[in-house]
Amino acid sequence: MSEIKRSFNDEMGFLKREDTTSYSIRPGFVQGMNVPGKFYVNDQLERLMLDELRSFSRQSNNAGGFLPAVKQIGNVAALPGIVKHSIGLPDIHSGYGFAIGNVAAFDMGLPEAVVSPGGVGFDINCGVRLVRTNLLFSDVLPVKETLAQSLFDHIPVGVGSMGIIPTKEQDLEEALQIGIDYSLREGYAWPEDKEHCEEYGRMLNADPGKVSSRAKKRGLPQLGTLGAGNHYAEIQVVDEIYDEFVAKKMGIDQKGQVCVMIHSGSRGLGHQVATDALVDMERAMTRDNIRTNDRQLACARIHSDEGQHYLKAMSAAANYAWVNRSSMTFLTRQAFAKVFNQSPEDLDMHVIYDVSHNIAKVEEHQVDGTCKQLLVHRKGSTRAFPPHHPLIPVDYQLTGQPVIVGGTMGTCSYVLTGTDKGMRETFGSTCHGAGRALSRNKSRNNLDYGDVLKRLEDSQDALPRS
Amino acid sequence: MFNYMSPLEKVELVRSVEVQATGHDLLDLLYHLLDEFLYMFATEMLICRCIEILSFDQEKFSIRARGYGETKMDLKKHEQGTEIKAITMHMMKILDPTSMLTEDGKSERQEAAEAEFPYEVYVLLDI
């Protein structure tokens, strides 16, 4: 659908700063908005959002590339069945159809409500897992290089790497069906790991039969690999504790404590599932008379064959990612055990929590005073449920769900907890970190490879080789 | 494309693999051809140094090609480059000596063709 080009000032007429941390987007900003938009930014992030909009309004034609994030929030607000508002979290930036950091919930009680693979992301169940240890920085410092090398030797990483835990086609089928329960059965996960994992490490509506053989063929050799790009396994040191009670509940009791953060997803399998679904749904849209502002917002009625097919395949891909993170947790435990000559149990390498930041979930939320069942799309966004929520583990009932926000290489990561306010305002969702202040293109052009290495060197991190 | 994943100078011409692709137009066909090679890489670690076109039907938009290189990327021999996650159709351009084909249709070339490479394609890859 072609948009009438407006001046930047006219565009700004639809945006209103609501308070120090949020903006609203009035319907009319793009065609057909069913609900308003809302995005959370401070001054610095506001500048990025508005600069992007300004450049866009100056272009004579769409030179390609994604639409500005604010426009994408608007286009998502125009999807059928969306409730309350289309949400942009602080690390929001343009993506395929939905911006990354764009949350949208759809009323499952409405027949026109849709599900959209672009709202989940191509890397289904890309997520972060935080593993604690009993070690302090002072224990690790003298063996820093050996430990880094050990991790490298144990965890397959980078282009061309293959999983080292032997897996056959039948294993993959089971992994897709039962997720972390597969890892548990095979001896790669501890029972407690399951407790501290979103969805308890397995989505029950998964159906491996809905995953194409092409996706499976891509997934099989990659099971147990870290992947490349912005995925990582990082040894981290606790720098600051802001709430001792909460930290202790998570197993973090002192500054200088060493943890490991694993950021990874469903590799080529998830990607193929998303691609397959988009093709499928584009076909169905004409049949079901669904129109969107952007071709990349391909979607299907939640209760249609295509919609259900995707959700079942998505859940299977999510299960794959949990098996992957479990495999890497196992390998990380082995790597540490080897260097410190103690068992992972003695090192107390428990999983603090495992969060997904590319997924769609069926959840109950209050909408205008009524409890409704919603399909919540979180793309580049983490669930953040408050204390006493029935879906979070017993251990975290008093504190709220741990929310792991990973930083980019060389910057800090954060562990937060979910709040009631978040539950009310954003369907219990927050940012996912490892977001971009510079677009991928800009960082490639502006960040000198040598500079990045030198800065890491100066801050005493062990240098990765690849 | 393969050069992004690993510098091609170190790839020998040892094995070959045949792929085929079809599409509903030329751009779609190019997308599927690249995707088939990427799929070969994902499943068999195939790195191709050169490609031979076996048959190319420009009316029916189908193509058969053979890639020559090595299967099973050997991490000791082949440097690890950037992983390519996917081919995209974003801003895809196919240029022949006189015209340019994009999502919006055929138009005149904006810059003259280079004598050595009269045909060019531009494809955005997701890394």
Image (cartoon, grey):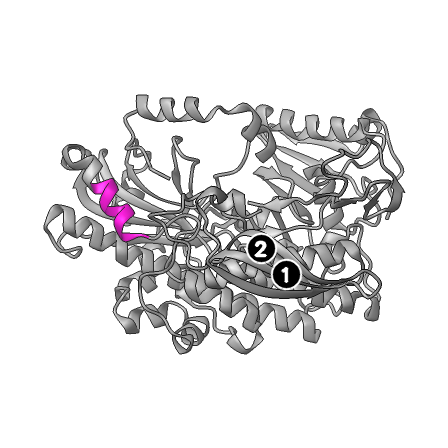
Mark drawn on residue A292 = none
Can you identify the residue that label 1 sits on? A275
Classify mark 1: helix, strand or loop.
helix
Chain identifier of the residue bearing label 1 in the image: A
Residue B63 or residue A305, whichever sits in front: B63
**Is A153 within the magenta?**
yes
Q: Residue at x 39, y 38 (%)?
A: A414
Mark drawn on residue A122 = 2
Query: CB atoms at circles 2 and 1 under 8 Å apart?
Result: yes
Q: Residue at x 48, y 43 (%)?
A: A229
**Is A188 within the magenta?**
no
Classify mark 2: helix, strand or loop.
loop
Q: Which kind of residue does numbered mark 1 sit on?
A: Thr
Q: Which kind of residue does numbered mark 2 sit on?
A: Phe
Q: Quadrant of residue A73?
A: top right
Look at the picture and state if A87 lies above or below A390.
Answer: above
Q: Magenta residues?
A: A147-155
Q: Residue at x 48, y 23 (%)?
A: A448
Whether residue A115 is visible: no
